[in-house]
Image (cartoon, grey):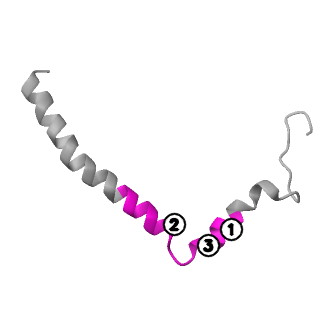
Amino acid sequence: MDISHYDTLRHFADSWGLVYMMAIFVAVAVFLLRPGAKAHADAAARIPLDDAHPLQRGNDR
């Protein structure tokens, strides 16, 4: 790969890569802050404390 091709790819990654990563960040933030997300987040937070359905171990079957 010659140096001009490398510079072109690096410039593309510097400019559009930042836009891509910012779009991913905004999408995740919107997904987490949507109105119905609180119930799902609370349910996921209680998973480690839920003793009603303990995880099965390999030899306990």
Near-viewer residue (6 or 57) = 6
Residue wearing tag 3: 38
Q: What range of the chain is rendered magenta?
A: 24-43
Could you give the CA–CA distance between mark 3 and mark 1, rounded to whole angstroms? Answer: 6 Å
Q: Residue at x 70, y 61 (%)?
A: 45
Looking at the rendered image, the quarter that the N terminus falls into is: top left
Q: Which mark is residue 28?
A: none
| Label 3: few (<14), some (14–19) or many (≥20) C-alpha neighbours in 10 Å | few
Give the answer, above or below, for where 55 lies relative to 30: above
Give the answer, above or below, for where 35 lies relative to 47: below
Instruction: Tell me the element at label 1.
Output: helix
Residues at discs 3 and 1 in contact (Cβ within 8 Å): yes
- Residue 53: x and y in percent read 85, 56
Residue 27 in magenta?
Answer: yes
Residue wearing tag 1: 42
Residue 17 in magenta?
Answer: no
Residue wearing tag 2: 32
- Residue 59: x and y in percent read 90, 33
**Between discs 2 and 3, the one toward the N terminus:** 2
Looking at the rendered image, the quarter that the C terminus falls into is: top right
Amino acid type, callout 1: Asp
